[in-house]
Image (cartoon, rainbow, N blue to C red):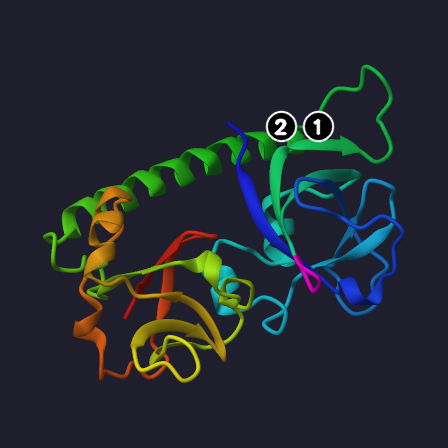
Amino acid sequence: MNFVYQAKVVGLNFHKVENAVEKGDYVILKSDESNEFDSDAIAVFNAERELIGHIANSEKTLSTNNRKNGNISASELKGELSFDNIEYYAEAVRVYSSCIYLEINEGKWSYINKPVDGAEPTEIEVLKSEIVALKAIVVDLQDQVSSLKTLVTAGGDNSSSTTSDGRVLYSVVGLSHFDGQDHLGYELSIAEEPIYEGAKGTALYLKSGKYRVGVFPSFKKKQYCLDHNIPYCDSKTLKGKTFDGDVIIEEIVYGEYAVVSV
């Protein structure tokens, strides 16, 4: 079983290309040994071998929420995969004007300079292959443990679930109606605001900086949450409370819903 890593491409504005990358396209990842700013730099090219950017490798380019959503840095990716004479092919799963999110399958790669035919793999290459297989097994086991924790901590129909460390889970829906899911690098907050400018009615929103990410569901959305196995709690229980920036996205399905903990 091949493990799939997630990473973020940044620096798109510094590279003008004739062939823009679109969702579903494959890009090429190569170690950028000559990079004077980052010894662990990984360059990203489109299918036409035009440089489009680099894998994020700092706190400025890879936010806490990026990490929460599974993205790892270039240094971490090099710790998982060997880039020695190897280039990897990654799929662009989300494409924005400022960045691109990738899925990198460790099994999709080729040699930059193909070895002589008939050459036997070295002992180090064999060990690396075995380590990759073991890591995939560990990740699978961790996923199973996380699933069991969710089942154990699930609450009743009208109460939120909790995480293993006691944080309370709440659902956020309607992500397709807001821009915030594309701006998750800012501090998250929960705010009660008018539904639209001048409206008398208010709703409770999850916000990333000034952007609305989604809305906490009303009682009418309870069945939607139950049908999709999303922790539900009447949003009225959150009104009037402050969380001092201690809001974390635990799960997100872009264009649909998110689960946050406080």
Which numbered marker is on residue 262?
none
**Residue 10 at x, y percent in the picture:** 70, 62
Q: Please say if 183 is above or below 19.
A: below
Q: Which mark is residue 126?
A: 2
Does 28 appear in magenta?
A: no
Mark 2, secondary structure of its residue: helix
> Majority secondary structure of the magenta segment?
loop
Q: Which residues are magenta?
A: 96-100
Decide if residue 130 is on the left or right side of residue 43: left
Name the quadrant containing residue 259: bottom left
Q: Are marks 2 and 1 in contact (CB under 8 Å)?
A: yes
Residue 127 position in % (x across, y down): 59, 32
Which residue is pictured at 25% across the width and 45% down the height? 229
Question: Which amino acid type is shown beneath numbered disc 2?
Answer: Val
Relative image position of residue 138 (x, y in whole percent): 40, 38
- Reading the image, the residue beneath label 1 is 122
Q: Nearer the viewer, residue 219 or 67?
A: 219
CA gap between label 2 and label 1 equals 6 Å
Residue 161 in view here:
yes
Give the residue at x 16% y 51%.
154
Using residue 41 as the reference point, say whether residue 161 is left or right of it. Answer: left
Q: Position of residue 103 (x, y in %)?
A: 60, 44
Identify residue type, mark 1: Thr
Residue occupying the point 38% across, 54% down: 257
Compared with 169, 201 (above or below) is below
